[in-house]
Amino acid sequence: MNFNNWLDYLVKKKKGNILFFLFSITIAIIGYFSQIRWVKKYCLNELSNSACMHINIRLYGIPILIFILCIFLFFLLKYRAYIKKLLSSISFLSIQFFNSFKNNFIKTFNYIDNMSDKRNFYISFLIITVISFLVFNAKFSFRILDPSNVNWMNSGDLIQNYLGWYTYQTSQLTFPLGVHYTMNFPMGTSVGYTDSLPLFAFIFKYIIPSGYQYFGFWLIICNFLQAWMSLLIIRVFNRNLLLTIISSLFIYLFPVFLHRYLHMNLECHWLILISLYLYIAKLNLNFKLKLFSFILIISAWIHPYISFLLTIFYSFFLFQEFINSNLKIKNTLKHFIITISSVFLSFFIIGYFHIDGTADYAYGSFSANILSFFNPTSEEFSNILKVIPINTSKYESFNYLGFGLIILFSSLLITNKFSFYFLKSKKNIGFLLSILVAILISLSPHISFGEKKLFSLPLTNDIYNILSIFRSNGRFLWPVTYLLAILSLYSFLKLDFSKIKKLFILSLLLIIQIYDINYLIKNSYSFDSKPNYDHELYSVLNSFLNAKRNIIIGYPTGSEKNYHTIEYLCAQKRCQTNVGYLARNDLKAETKFSEIIYKELEKSQLKENYIYYFDKIYSKTFESSLNSAENFCKETQFYHVCVKKVN
């Protein structure tokens, strides 16, 4: 008896039905006893396993499920001939549907491919705008566009940015325009040193109500410009609508861009994309020079790191045009001097030169790594690749391409199809040099491969100190990462096979890319929690404030752990404080003032216009101030607050 005859006997004959039924019961009983053994092993002593909380489901549910599956199998075997015919019909209809869909898709694709370039551009511009609109809502939410909504800036650098703006907004206008004395008393500080976006701070200082924010507006501008510049760059070497959209999404949804949401000033990656675009696009030279100068000057009003990065690319662009005899030496120097002078003038007006803004950490503390392109640095940032251990800062070393782009880049490299078209031409010598300099700065002074330090660059003390101004030098690898992605897309789109195949492959890689970096696209901010201000300290300090006593002095000076409470109070009450969280400060002046405050508290020589507060760990050190009859002191849970009595 062959196999089919056995099946017919089991499902058609009465005796066979009984045998199949007994078989099903036997399998279910075996399943039941296997669950009893499991329960005895894991659940007798305590509910150590979460499944033990539902023992009855395991004991009875699983055997019943096995029995139901056996009965389902019985009916499948009984009516297998009918099922086979049904599947054959479905398969035939599916093939017809697929062929119809394929033909219609090819017709539509060819129609789109033959559209006029102008119409193509407008449609692609509209599509990428809609996509970026949706991505912005997914990542940030439109709620941050409400200027009165400040709760989303409730911790870390976000609250530093907001309070830096709030204290500047409520301070008196001085010159340089970005300097104010609400924080960091008596030296004062710049709105640039709180990363509060000086460009918008000047624009909105007297426009929006006190305490409102403009950062949500800034983020959506960066979001749109990132998308639009991605589109323009891809259109330099491809004009097919669908291929352009898919390719530009790789650049728009770039991990290093999505990763920077906590440093809002540094979301302006569109400035980097513009500088790359000016190198690779065929545009009028005069227009390129004007636009390059404009974005460099604008960058000074956004973030000095971006300015320094663009200065490298701008300088070598001028050098390139001079070497190619497109600019004379006189015009080259003229453009350079005017632009760089404008940048430094902007820095002066913002107030970056108001104090000796030395770095808190040495150069190279936040450098990149040779493996940065392939290292997500955090398990959250990639759903596919594991973190590669490195000996440099994980945060600033982040220059991850994304797994979809890694597949594309690696495939092109292995098959020898990766093109260095934009860099290998002698006419683009400036572009090549700017990339090499950016790589060198980002990796130095200690060139590392993973956890292994390969070698160190021999830097003199003077060069080392100058470079220490830009201690987060890993950021200088950003344009290189973008260029690597752009060249990968360029190389792929120039391959000699059909556009439909290219579209299919790129779409598949984009799905992989989005899956891989999904965490970076998802919502990033908490809207429900408010800043954790010390309300008790706020209340006590506020009770001592008056017209004459309006300077709050914390010991030690500088960035105290409760700086946000003090800044918030001084922004509201127009008082001054030596406390503040700043990107840079004059460390010598800060230390000197701290020593003065120490002596005043130690010897009980309090000033009448100061309100002193210090942590309770200094209770014995400043005992004379606490016990002096000339002073009046209150205490909170963590602090002592003292003032000199006024006669």
Image: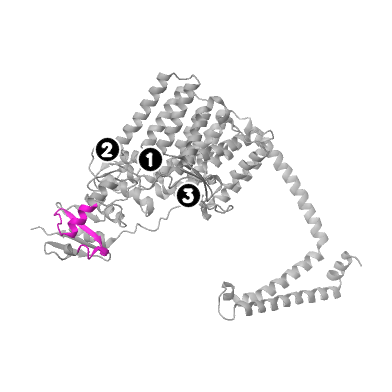
The crowd level at tag 3 (other Cα within 10 Å; few <14, some 14-19, many 20+) is: many
Quarter of the N terminus within the rendering: bottom right
The crowd level at tag 2 (other Cα within 10 Å; few <14, some 14-19, many 20+) is: some
Tag 3: amino acid: Thr
The crowd level at tag 1 (other Cα within 10 Å; few <14, some 14-19, many 20+) is: few
Q: CA distance from mark 3 to mark 1?
A: 21 Å
Q: Which mark is residue 461?
A: 1
The answer to if 600 sits in the magenta stretch is yes
Q: CA distance from mark 2 to mark 3?
A: 37 Å
Say whether disc 3 or disc 1 marks the residue closer to the N-terminus: 3
**x then y, percent, for residue 28:** 73, 75
Q: Which label sits in the foreground, 3 or 1?
A: 1
Q: Which mark is residue 177?
A: 2
Q: Which mark is residue 392?
A: 3
- Foreground of the two, 617 or 526: 617
Tag 1: amino acid: Asn
Q: Which label sits in the foreground, 2 or 3?
A: 3
Q: Which label sits in the foreground, 2 or 1?
A: 1
Q: CA distance from mark 2 to mark 1?
A: 33 Å
Q: Which mark is residue 553?
A: none
Say whether disc 2 or disc 1 marks the residue closer to the N-terminus: 2
